[in-house]
Amino acid sequence: MRTGYGTIKCRGTRRCIRNGAETGELWGIRVTVANTQRVEVKDMAENINDAMSLTDTDVIAAWRALEGEIKDALMQGRRVSLGNLGTLSLEVGTATRKSVDEELRNTEIVAKGITFRPSKQLTQQISGLAFEWDGVVKQPLVDDALNEALGSYFAQHEYITVRNYATLCRCSLSTARRHIAALLAEGRLVKSGIAKGVYKWNG
């Protein structure tokens, strides 16, 4: 196993962490890892190939088979141990909030996602990582700059999503959802009708 990972560069985004008519806005910094490069299976296969007498094709074939086993186990509601990495398990809940006195029907139970619980060993290892602040803080667009960015965007695109909005306006997804809700209330955005979470400019 590799050691000596060096420092991990981090950057921040200025974001609204509290907003209300009485309390007013409170802005804070959300720190994230600066490196957004994703490691693909083929990249890991090449690294394993360099360390072991296995071809890239062998490693990828083994990984695909493992993927299938993991999916099958999760679809059966079983917990999956990933060795020294941790455990995967199915997260379930109800489609709407239910009180303790309400009857719960089978059809109201839905899958919420997959939960990853890191192992004690992995948790200890990541607690020893070193981080470096690179001093980059993106300022979210507001007022005239925001309107100008939206105008330029819709001059070239017909629709916008929450993620598109967050990227365009340099804000978090939660802030983007709040802004879109306000624009919908003002009538400047309308629901597209083609899919949930897709909006059309009506300004």
Image: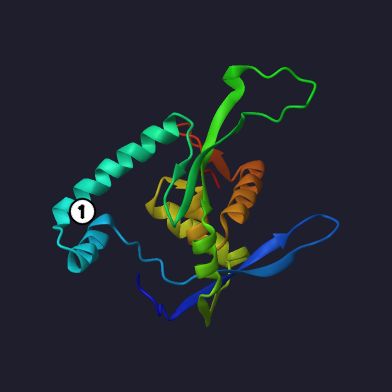
Q: Quadrant of residue 5?
A: bottom left
Give the image location of residue 194, x and y in percent: 44, 32
As rendered, which of 138 and 182 lies closer to the eye? 138
Task: Say left or right for 1 vs 79.
Answer: left
Q: Residues within 10 Å of mark 1 (few under 14, many from 20)?
A: some
Report the label total.
Answer: 1
Residue 123 lies, with reference to residue 161, above or below; the image says below
Percent coordinates x, y for residue 21 in the rendering: 82, 55
Report the quarter where the N terminus lies: bottom left
Q: Residue at x 58, y 72 (%)?
A: 139
Q: Can I make out residue 199 in this image?
A: no
Tell me what residue is drawn at x 40 percent, y 80 percent.
Answer: 4
Q: Looking at the image, which is closer to me, 105 or 3?
A: 3
Can residue 163 be seen in the rendering of this structure? yes
Q: Is 189 rendered above or below residue 165?
A: above
User: Judging from the image, what secondary structure is the residue with disc 1 in?
Assistant: helix
Q: Position of residue 49 (x, y in %)?
A: 18, 63
Quadrant in the picture for residue 38:
bottom left
Q: In the rendered view, would you say 159 is above or below 120?
A: above
Q: Is residue 109 left or right of residue 3?
A: right
| Residue under pointer 1 | 59
Q: Residue at position x 22%, y 59% from top?
A: 45
The image quarter containing residue 71 is top left
Q: Relative to 26, say whether 107 is above or below.
A: above
Q: Amino acid at mark 1?
A: Val
146 displayed left or right of 45: right
Residue in view at x 79 percent, y 55 percent: 20
Residue at the far right in the pictured view = 22
